[in-house]
Image: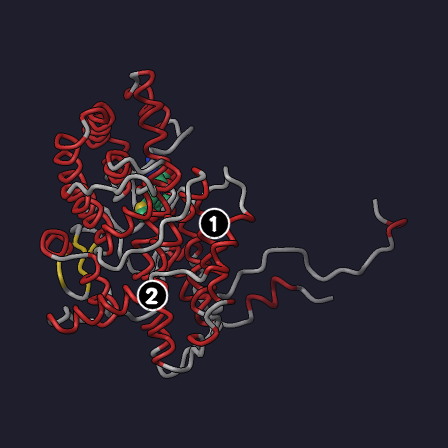
Amino acid sequence: VIDCQALAKEFGMFTFDPAFMTTASCESTITFIDGEKGILLYRGYPIEQLAEKSSYLEVCYLLLYGELPTREQMESFQAIVCHHTMLNEGLLRFYNGFRHDAHPMSMLVGVVGALSSYYHDSMDIKSPEHRNVSALRLIAKMPTIAANSYKHIIGQPYVYPRNDLGYVENFMNMMFSVPAEPYSFNETAVRALEILLILHADHEQNASTSTVRLAGSSQANPFSCIAGGIATLWGPAHGGANEAVIRMLYEIDKFKNVHEYIKQVKDRSIRLMGFGHRVYKNYDPRAKIIREICHKLLSELNAEHQPLFETAMELERIALEDQYFIERQLYPNVDFYSGMILRALNIPLNMFTVIFAVARTVGWVSQWLEMMNEPNVRIGRPRQLYIGATQRDYLPVEKRV
Ligand code: ACO
């Protein structure tokens, strides 16, 4: 009889690290995080400087190619991205298969996965040119796919991309314009969304990025790998938290019961959404920036959502003074305040994680490119500790008890 558990122990040494608490899965030059000090750098540049001075497309270039672009490089990058914003008309018909009350993240997973059936011409993953054009196609088409999901839900006609607009303006136009009324942009709103996209662009080996890398290590095509990343992002412990935070704040606000809510969190009946992070054991630097723009935006745009912001501030103040949160080093993360910005921009709740996915696409494709550019990509294959039954013989059904 084979003693499986004894045999498993003889397989040799490997680390047992469920949830990868202390395991680095790769070397990377893209994003640096110091969780103790609350530092985040993209290619060496502090997130605070990029949020203040850069644009989302410039950050895309930086993440993809490692350096800030010259003026000429930026102009040609912008032109290439514009060139790829359209979707094949066949893909538009794909949306009709989804229910109108479908969550837009489900459409995003499906439509992005379906890109692989439209772009055979860019899918030779052994060719650097093909890999690059696939990455650009994904960055360019994601806002179109996201906006179409929204239009499908609300039953309005799809708005085609406009290449005379910037990346963020084009996205807002596809989301909010209707044929009869041209959409008028508010500069503060455009800049707020741009900063949000910059802050969400990459975050090293989080769950969705690790999914993309693992899928990519099997030599799967890039569109399928990114669809896997989107599916992973959807979970409330990851990108789905921005939606969950707003639902939580409405609930707290309805009953005016911050203390009662915190009590339930400490009883472990619920988690405080938008709080805590695997890597940050200090204030998430992105949350600091978002809290500031949130304050500015709400006072400039939409006083209506101010009470929610005040509830969030009170929640944060009480939590940060509470021993439970202090001992566990739980601070607001990027999602704690981001939902309030999206709310103020009139973006519906179920689109929050979609916006996150639009922003993170560049991070996913940059990480995928970095891995695929290595000379020998080995398939990712974690081991396990087997703790199941030892070998036994099959029993016919009449002999089973
Ligand atoms: N509320 C209350 N307690 C919490 C929270 C929270 N949000 N987060 C962690 N804790 C507690 C846990 O109960 C645990 O306590 P214990 O040691 O007494 O059992 C301790 O802190 C450690 O928690 P873990 O779950 O082990 O931490 P982990 O690193 O695995 O989880 C995570 C990180 C998933 C982000 C977690 O903090 C969480 O669920 N937060 C809420 C959801 C959220 O905001 N997600 C967005 C993350 S950012 C992003 O993905 C963009």
Which residue is at the front of the view, 187 or 331?
187
Q: Is residue 320 above or below residue 151?
A: above
Q: Which residue is mark 1?
A: 107
Label count reads 2
Q: Is residue 254 left or right of residue 106?
A: left
Q: Which percent across, then down, holds residue 341?
A: 23, 38
The residue most toward the right is 398
The residue most toward the front is 180
Q: Residue at x 29, y 60 (%)?
A: 204
Q: Residues within 10 Å of mark 2 (few under 14, many from 20)?
A: some
Label 1: which secondary element = helix
| Rendered-image quarter of ligand 1 | top left
Residue 289 position by quadrant:
top left
Identify which amino acid the numbered label 2 is placed on: His
Q: Which percent across, then down, holds residue 282?
A: 20, 45
Q: Which residue is mark 2?
A: 84
Label 2: which secondary element = loop
Answer with mark 1 or mark 2, whichever residue precedes in sequence.
2
Which residue is at the front of the view, 354 or 152?
152
Which residue is at the front of the view, 56 or 83?
83
Residue 322 showing in the rendered view: no
Q: Is residue 372 left or right of residue 221?
A: left
Q: Residue at x 28, y 32 (%)?
A: 324
Residue 261 position by quadrant:
top left
Identify which amino acid the numbered label 1 is placed on: Met
Q: Is residue 235 left or right of residue 304?
A: right
